[in-house]
Image (cartoon, rainbow, N blue to C red):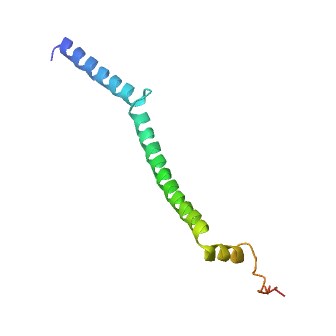
Amino acid sequence: MVMIEKTIFYLALVLMVLILFVMYFSENGIRDYDQLTLKQAHVLSRIQITRQENKAIEKQILRLKQDAAYIKHLAKHEHGMAAPDELIFIQTKE
């Protein structure tokens, strides 16, 4: 190779490395794209979890509107209430 050809080769090589460096580390580069892709996956999983929670809440609301036995069950077991004709026995530790 002639000296000019070697110089052009090394200059082109340096230029390619510089372009790759800029593509990877610049704003909106490959690194930012990878971070945004991970963030998108996280957000999509949170959306799926929230949709499932919303369905469960909607189901519970529907049961509270329509199912009197469910309301009685919640009153007894979660709020410690009793019907007028029931007795509550509380066991204490000794």
Single out the residue that lies furthest toward the top: 4
* Residue shown at the point (23%, 15%) measured from the top left: 8
Q: Is residue 86 left or right of residue 4?
A: right
Residue 44's x, y, as percent? 45, 48
Single out the residue that lies furthest toward the left: 1
* Residue shown at the point (67%, 76%) measured from the top left: 72
Vertical placement of residue 93 versus 25, above or below: below
* Residue shown at the point (38%, 33%) measured from the top left: 30
Q: Is residue 59 left or right of residue 77?
A: left
Residue 86's x, y, as percent? 76, 86
Q: Quadrant of the C terminus?
A: bottom right
Q: Is residue 89 left or right of residue 46?
A: right
Q: Quadrant of residue 18?
A: top left
Residue 35's x, y, as percent? 45, 39
Q: Quadrant of residue 20?
A: top left
Residue 92's x, y, as percent? 82, 85
